Amino acid sequence: MGGHHESEIKIPDYRIYKVDNVPDLVKVRDILATEGLKDPWLRNEVWRFPPSHGSRYQQYFKCWFRGKRGLTIAFGLAGSLIAVEKIYEHFYPPVHHHRKPYFPSSSV
């Protein structure tokens, strides 16, 4: 079943994962140290954190506004279209057919 691909799975060396490289895990380690505790398996959580490229909010900003060009273009086009529509309505206001006239005709 599946095929006979003999691809080798590369398992990274465990020594590349260091708690000192992840600020969030360093905080956890320090909090545990103040309580007199130690987590020997904390190194196993390092892979969950991406390499340090700024804070979590900076990574979020990069993801949405630099990484996804289509979303940035879509927001720009939507904003431009709304601006054009507002300018058009300013110079050519819509006619309201169900509005009472300002000077009603006298029926006397």
Image: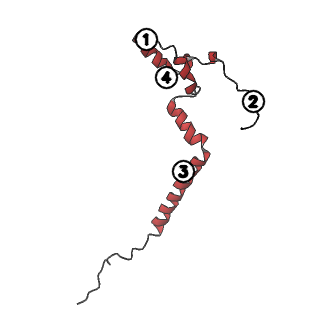
Q: Which of the two residues, 86 or 30, is positioned nearer the viewer here?
A: 30
Amino acid tagged 4: Asp
Q: Nearer the viewer, mark 2 or mark 3?
A: 2
Label 2 vs label 3: CA separation? 43 Å
Q: Check whether the beta carbons of the residues at disc 3 and disc 4 lie within 8 A of each other.
A: no
Q: Earlier in the sequence, mark 2 or mark 1?
A: 2
Q: Nearer the viewer, mark 1 or mark 4?
A: 1
Total numbered circles? 4
Looking at the image, is mark 3 or mark 4 nearer the viewer? 4
Estimate the spatial distance between the alpha carbons at disc 2 and disc 4, rounded to whole Å. Answer: 35 Å
Tag 2 near tag 3, CB within 8 Å: no
In this picture, residue 86 sits left or right of residue 12: left
Foreground: disc 2 or disc 1:
2
Nearer-the-camera pick, 40 or 86:
40
Label 2 packing within 10 angstroms: few (<14), some (14-19), many (20+): few
Q: Position of residue 33 (x, y in %)?
A: 44, 11
Categorize mark 3 by other alpha carbons within 10 Å: few (<14), some (14-19), many (20+). few
Q: Rate crowding at label 4 as few (under 14), some (14 to 19) or many (20 or more) other CA atoms within 10 Å.
A: few
The label on residue 75 is: 3
Camera-nearest residue between 5 and 93:
5
Say what amino acid the circle numbered 1 marks.
Leu
**Mark pair 1, 4: CA separation:** 17 Å
Amino acid type, mark 2: Ser
Label 1 vs label 3: CA separation? 49 Å
Indicate which disc, 2 or 3, sits on the residue closer to the N terminus. 2
The label on residue 37 is 1
- Quadrant the N terminus occupies: top right
Q: Quadrant of residue 77?
A: bottom right
Residue that numbered label 2 is attached to: 7
Indicate the position of residue 44 as horizontal and vertical percent values: 55, 20
Question: Does label 1 or label 3 sit earlier along the sequence?
Answer: 1
